[in-house]
């Protein structure tokens, strides 16, 4: 095995990127992180500049997707995909990716990934040029979220709203509130637009759970069922409510 393995991390959430870097340092101190990127174009540049042994790539990034960057890394770097969804897992393993990490990070699962990375290090990097960049899998059906120190699996039909909450996104149901690391922007790509509407940069709501809409201070606000809170609707999203 090489005495000094190298890797780049490409993830557009800086907090998650820092968390992953710290966790890798604890699990594999000898692994050198030689570059970090917040978008796919920078990741592709780091592949050329740093020539890492491993590239840990978020599947969905600005510029180029993780899959597109992985194609560029064919026979050049071992690939580990990082994402909130597992729709690429089978294809990734079939093509030769080292592993597939789901957000939020789990240290026990990451430890397994590190062992797989060590096992792969002496081998030639795989050819991922045949991976499909877009797989149409339909709207999201369930959410894997953190709640009370546990991972909960929440049926999408139970979700009333998604709301940005510091570095997390809060998942609200009638029974509980849980947290995920997926951004509002990425969630919107996975949701049925007939069931969920974005009302601001920080909130998505289930249409059928809206109880009332009214004008407040020359703006539009809505109240969800069984709630007293009025949520502001940004100007860019108010046109949706003309059909209600």
Image (spheres, grey):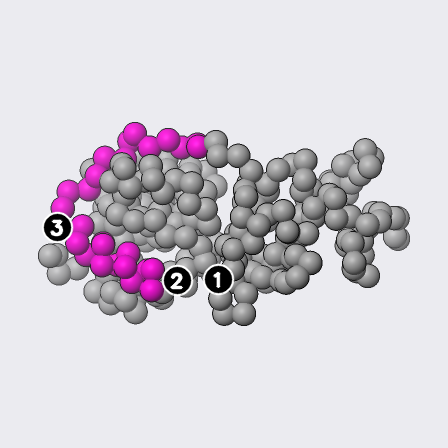
- Residue 135 appears at what percent x and percent y? 44, 32
Q: Is residue 59 left or right of residue 163?
A: left
- Are the residues tagged 1 and 3 within 8 Å (C-beta)? no
Q: Name the residue: 82% across, 50% down.
A: 211
Res. 122 mark: 3
Decide which of 173, 182 is in the foreground and name it: 173
Q: Residues within 10 Å of mark 1 (few under 14, many from 20)?
A: some
Marks 1 and 2, how far apart in space? Answer: 10 Å
- Are the residues tagged 1 and 2 within 8 Å (C-beta)? yes
**In magenta segment, residue 113:** yes
Q: Name the residue: 23% across, 35% down.
A: 127
- Residue 158 appears at what percent x and percent y? 64, 51
User: Which secondary structure lies at badge 3?
Assistant: loop
Marks 2 and 3, how far apart in space? Answer: 26 Å
Q: Residues within 10 Å of mark 3 (few under 14, many from 20)?
A: few
The answer to whether any part of residue 218 appears in the image is no
Residue range highlighted in magenta: 108-135
Quadrant showing the C terminus:
top right
Which residue in the protein does label 2 denote? 106
The answer to whether any part of residue 92 appears in the image is yes
Q: Residues within 10 Å of mark 2 (few under 14, many from 20)?
A: few
Marks 1 and 3, how far apart in space? Answer: 35 Å
Which comes before the other along the chain, label 1 or label 2?
Answer: 2
**In magenta segment, residue 198:** no
Which residue in the protein does label 1 denote? 151
Res. 242 mark: none
User: Which secondary structure lies at badge 2?
Assistant: loop
- Residue 197 appears at what percent x and percent y? 69, 42
């Amino acid at each position: 095995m090489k005495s000094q393995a190298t890797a780049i991390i490409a993830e557009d959430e800086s907090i998650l990127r820092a968390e992953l870097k710290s966790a890798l340092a604890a699990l594999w101190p000898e692994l050198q992180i030689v570059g970090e990127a917040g978008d796919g174009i920078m990741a592709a540049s780091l592949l050329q500049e740093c020539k890492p042994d491993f590239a840990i790539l978020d599947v969905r990034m600005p510029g180029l997707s993780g899959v597109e960057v992985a194609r560029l890394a064919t026979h050049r770097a071992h690939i580990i995909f990082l994402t909130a969804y597992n729709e690429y897992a089978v294809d990734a393993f079939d093509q030769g990716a080292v592993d597939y990490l789901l957000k939020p990070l789990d240290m026990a699962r990451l430890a397994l990934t590190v062992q797989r990375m060590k096992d792969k290090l002496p081998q030639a990097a795989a050819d991922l040029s045949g991976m499909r960049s877009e797989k149409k899998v339909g709207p999201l059906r369930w959410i894997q979220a953190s709640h009370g120190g546990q991972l909960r699996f929440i049926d999408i039909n139970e979700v009333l709203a998604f709301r940005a909450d510091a570095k997390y996104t809060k998942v609200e149901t009638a029974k509980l509130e849980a947290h995920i690391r997926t951004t509002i922007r990425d969630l919107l790509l996975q949701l049925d637009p007939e069931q969920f509407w974005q009302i601001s940069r920080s909130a998505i709501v289930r249409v059928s759970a809206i109880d009332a809409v009214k004008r407040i201070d020359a703006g539009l606000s809505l109240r969800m069922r069984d709630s007293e809170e009025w949520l502001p609707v940004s100007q860019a999203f108010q046109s949706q409510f003309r059909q209600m």
